[in-house]
Image (spheres, coloured by chain):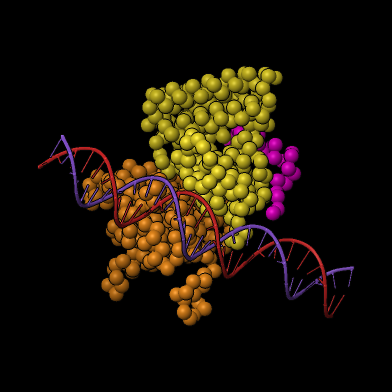
Chain colours: A orange, B yellow, C purple, D red
DNA sequence: CGAGCCAGTTTTGCATACAATCTCCTCCCG
DNA sequence: CGGGAGGAGATTGTATGCAAAACTGGCTCG
């Protein structure tokens, strides 16, 4: 191992340095610490994390395969920037994939996964109800909401029991955008999302795959519509070069 | 560059060693030179291609993200082996994605892409008609058929103009299986495929997205059914361990 | 005779070194 | 004063070295 971890065996590297770099870069991109178009220079990142370039490079290529960053030959990685059309397309793709996942979960899901799903839906609802609390910083509330939302969706995807689909959804759910969308939601919109979560979960539990799929699709497309308004207002064209 | 290229500037490395390794490993996997479960040892492969391990490793991770190989921590890469259920699931996923692509192509496709599509469909048909020729080795015929088939499908995907979808289909179309499926097709089944190609192309050209999507889906699911019979007969359970 | 364990080998995962390419800035010439 | 050649610095792409982890085989001990 390198120097730099003086004492403390609690610094687990159990998943390897590449996975660690992946997690941290991903989080930075998701939360917007690196904005669209920003270059991700291997040397700088590796110094930032006290690693060599090798695992950083590996992490970047993995993020590329998930669509979060783009590579250009001899120019390295940069955070992907998307036009409004790209966002629209991506959300429709996601809607179809998660709709499929919901259908499968209706057929294959276990009781346990249904319980987890319900639990996440209820927690989401509680967090929405408490969304007026001034005790917590807005960003922290959004982050908690985002985590719970992800947990709900991921539970369904896992219940579908389709490895390839799971892998693809990791690349189709543009987490930076979901984060941003949740941030811009009004309370009533959050409540509507919670409603869709409940309805979808209910359909899945009853094994009504087609309805579950349609609800999920509609849920995601509603989110898309709201996000598109946001993008139109704030970014104008939403196009960033380089 | 390394030694080993004494004379001749024609040895273009224009795309980089990693891309070269990617192409060659991929081809080996697709055509079955490496079978499911075979380990892909970095050292051996790099010697085989006269490269260092670095680009080979990068190529392997890329193939992993496309689902052709699997990695296990500290155990490296192996060709992915799939159960019959996995194959069934994968084909349904592909059917949905390509169905979406066909819908989009109906709306967004240019005249030029329609022409390319028709041309590929016609070539496929001609190759099917000539599939009795004894002048050509069976494997070469299948390879040509596979190439043309890929060209048809990829033209539609390209016409959809959805970058992310394109990327995903690269990982959802399990080329080894498609190759194998075509290999097992009877002449009548090939003719039916050609028929579906024509019908789908027609629907796309007329802008009837829903029909195009359904035809594409049915086309792919028919291929799946045929392949599943094959797998059931030849592999028994189709499960291979380590 | 079988289970467990220890050493040797293989292979991965990470670090580092080096060469090729790109970028950008300067400087010279028209 | 503008534009292009060229060189310095920055950054990627590839090669290689090394330590840790996993597999293999044989040995001991029950």
Camera sees residue B34: yes
Q: Quadrant of residue A145?
A: bottom left
Q: Residue at x 53, y 40 (%)?
A: B6
Q: Quadrant of residue B123?
A: top right
Depicted A47 relative to depicted B51: above or below? below
Depicted B3 relative to depicted B145: above or below? below
Magenta-colored stretch includes residue A96? no
Residue B48 location in percent, x, y? Answer: 62, 45
On the rendered structure, is B132 left or right of A237? right
How many numbered marks are there?
Answer: 0
Depicted B52 relative to depicted B102: above or below? below
Camera sees residue B171: no
Magenta span: chief secondary structure: helix
- Report the magenta residues as a range: B221-242
Q: Residue at x 31, y 44 (%)?
A: A83
Residue B236 location in percent, x, y? Answer: 74, 44
On the rendered structure, is C8 left or right of B28? right
Magenta-colored stretch includes residue B225? yes
């Amino acid at each position: 191992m390198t120097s730099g971890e003086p004492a403390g065996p609690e610094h687990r590297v159990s998943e390897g340095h590449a996975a660690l770099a992946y997690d941290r870069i991903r989080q930075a991109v998701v939360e917007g610490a690196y904005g669209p178009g920003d270059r991700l220079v291997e040397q700088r990142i590796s110094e930032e994390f006290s690693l060599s370039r090798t695992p950083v490079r590996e992490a970047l290529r993995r993020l590329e395969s998930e669509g979060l960053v783009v590579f250009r030959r001899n120019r390295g990685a940069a955070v992907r920037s998307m036009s409004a059309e790209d966002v629209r397309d991506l959300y429709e793709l996601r809607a179809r994939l998660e709709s499929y996942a919901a259908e499968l979960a209706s057929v294959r899901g276990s009781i346990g996964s249904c319980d987890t799903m319900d639990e996440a839906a209820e927690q989401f609802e509680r967090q929405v109800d408490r969304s007026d609390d001034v005790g917590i910083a807005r960003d922290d509330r959004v982050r908690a909401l985002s985590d719970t939302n992800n947990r709900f969706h991921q539970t369904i995807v896992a219940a579908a029991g389709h490895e390839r689909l799971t892998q693809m959804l990791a690349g189709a759910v543009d987490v930076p955008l979901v984060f941003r969308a949740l941030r811009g939601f009004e309370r009533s919109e959050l409540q509507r999302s919670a409603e869709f979560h409940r309805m979808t979960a209910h359909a899945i539990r009853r094994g009504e795959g087609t309805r579950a799929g349609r609800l999920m699709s509609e849920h995601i497309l509603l989110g898309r519509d709201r996000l598109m308004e946001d993008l139109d207002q704030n970014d104008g064209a939403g196009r960033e070069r380089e």
